[in-house]
Amino acid sequence: MSPPRPTPDIPGPGQESVWDYPRPPRLEAVERHVEVVLGGVTIADAPRVFRVLETSHPPVFYVAPGHIRPGALVPTDRRTYCEFKGVAAYWTVVAGGRVEVDAAWSYPNPAPAYAALRDHVAFYPGRMDACFVDGERVRPQPGDFYGGWITDAVVGPFKGGPGTRGW
């Protein structure tokens, strides 16, 4: 039996509740400035990104390969399957003397509804020095599986912490 759905936090002005996000997830192209830093080096700097919105999850931001520092991503053999997006390929992220194995992922051949995500890369914010959306430092989604980016623009509660897996 799944744990009961939590009571969503009430969004304030300019905020979104992750409980209003759809399932299956929605893909949106957004003009948001996203930066990713590892080892003191900015490895991604993008003026436009895709974000994926899914019930109970903070947004995940996907960066086009042309906005990622050359040499910062090394492919790994890890693969996982998302029932909506398809098979994810993982990347080791390398910069400034830091090496974070399987700390980013992409969809080389996404499902048709997510075709625009092809080869765009998402980063686990908790594995980086820092990630930013429009200058605001991101807080990582709880748990070791999820890669959501928590900002002041979203309210939860968020899936990922203890006891939330069945939401």
Image (spheres, helix red, strand yellow):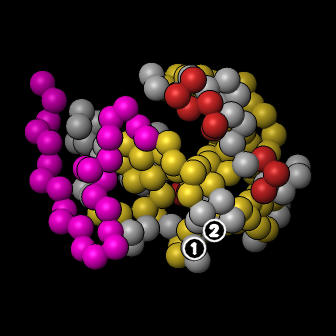
The quadrant in which residue 141 appears is: bottom left
Q: Is residue 159 magenta?
A: no
* Horizontal side of residue 134 vs 82, given as left or right: right
Q: To which quarter of the image does residue 80 belong?
A: top right
Report the span colored magenta.
Answer: 1-26
In the image, residue 42 lies at what x, y percent? Answer: 76, 67
Please identify the quadrant where the C terminus is shown. top left
Is mark 1 in CB contact (under 8 Å) with mark 2?
yes
Neighbor class of circle 2 (other Cα within 10 Å; few <14, some 14-19, many 20+) is some
Residue position for label 1 = 134
* Residue 111 drawn at (x, y percent): 56, 23
Q: Decide if residue 129 is on the left or right side of residue 155.
A: right
User: For this rendering, which residue is in front, 24 or 35?
Assistant: 24
Q: Position of residue 166 (x, y in %)?
A: 24, 33
User: Would you say residue 102 is visible in this rendering?
Assistant: no
| CA gap, disc 1 and disc 2 | 5 Å
Name which residue lies at 82% across and 51% down.
66
In the rendered view of the protein, which quadrant contains the N terminus?
A: top left
> Mark 1 belongs to which amino acid?
Asp
Q: Which residue is mark 2?
A: 33
Q: Nearer the viewer, residue 4 or 34?
A: 34
